[in-house]
Image: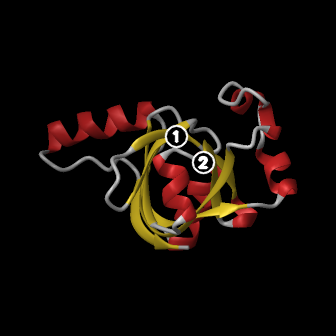
């Protein structure tokens, strides 16, 4: 699969993934729910200003986001940069009822920080159906070959 096709598959499938592990350089990974917007070439996160992710984003740190979803048939390790977004329209665009559970005053809570993760590069694994994966594993056992479980590659954004 070409780099462009693998990136397209990534953006198509990331919307079916709920949570990944986000970490800035020197910070332990944290489970974070994302809002993927292909047109922004970004993943958006909501956090509180006093959290390590909020502080790392305010400092503009390099970060890594890791995804493992059998349901979405997508596995990825993305490297990029964190930043704080202050545009209220973008907050309105990504806000969901699930986000409200984390903030007493909802979107108006002064602690809300909208964090942009801008990926620079990624290693992506995208496989097809589970049936195909089982077939490939069985075939490799019988033929002493290796299973072809899907597409894999490194991409830049």
| Image-quadrant location for residue 8 | bottom right
- Is residue 125 at least partly visible in the picture? no
Q: Using the image, determine if residue 52 lies above or below residue 17.
A: below
Is residue 140 shown left or right of residue 44? left
Callout 2: SS: loop
Q: What residue did someone put label 1 on?
A: 32
- Residue 138 is situated, as x and y percent measured from the top left of the image, at 24, 33
| Image-quadrant location for residue 110 | top right
- Residue 56 is situated, as x and y percent measured from the top left of the image, at 48, 59
Q: Using the image, determine if residue 120 lies above or below residue 149.
A: below
In the drawing, what numbered circle is on residue 49?
A: 2
In the drawing, what numbered circle is on residue 51?
A: none
Query: Distance from label 2 to label 1 (Cα)?
Result: 15 Å
In the foreground, 32 or 104: 104
- Residue 127 is situated, as x and y percent measured from the top left of the image, at 44, 46
| Image-quadrant location for residue 15 | top right
In the foreground, 24 or 153: 24
| Residue at point 69%, 24% (across, down) | 101
Callout 1: SS: strand
| Residue at point 17%, 50% (across, down) | 145
Scheme of colours in the image:
secondary structure
| Residue at point 58%, 35% (across, down) | 18
- Residue 98 is situated, as x and y percent measured from the top left of the image, at 70, 28
Is residue 22 shown left or right of residue 82? left
| Residue at point 77%, 34% (across, down) | 96
- Is residue 25 at least partly visible in the picture? yes
Quadrant where the C terminus sits is bottom right
Looking at marks 2 and 1 on the same chain, the residue that comes earlier in the sequence is marked by 1
Is residue 59 shown left or right of residue 109? left
């Amino acid at each position: 699969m070409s780099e462009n096709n693998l990136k397209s598959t990534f953006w198509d499938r990331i919307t079916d993934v709920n949570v990944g592990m986000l970490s800035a350089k020197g910070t332990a990974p944290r489970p974070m729910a994302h809002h993927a917007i292909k047109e922004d070439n970004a993943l958006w996160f909501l956090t509180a200003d006093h959290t390590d992710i909020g502080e790392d984003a305010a400092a503009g740190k390099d970060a890594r986001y890791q995804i493992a979803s059998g349901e979405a048939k997508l596995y990825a390790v993305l490297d990029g940069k964190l930043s704080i977004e202050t545009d209220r329209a973008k907050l309105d665009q990504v806000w969901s009822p699930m986000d409200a559970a984390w903030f007493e005053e909802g979107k108006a809570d002064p602690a809300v920080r909208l964090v942009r993760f801008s990926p620079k590069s990624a290693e992506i694994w995208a496989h097809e159906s589970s049936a195909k994966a089982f077939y490939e594993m069985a075939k490799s056992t019988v033929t002493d070959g290796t299973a072809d479980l899907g597409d894999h590659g490194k991409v830049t954004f």
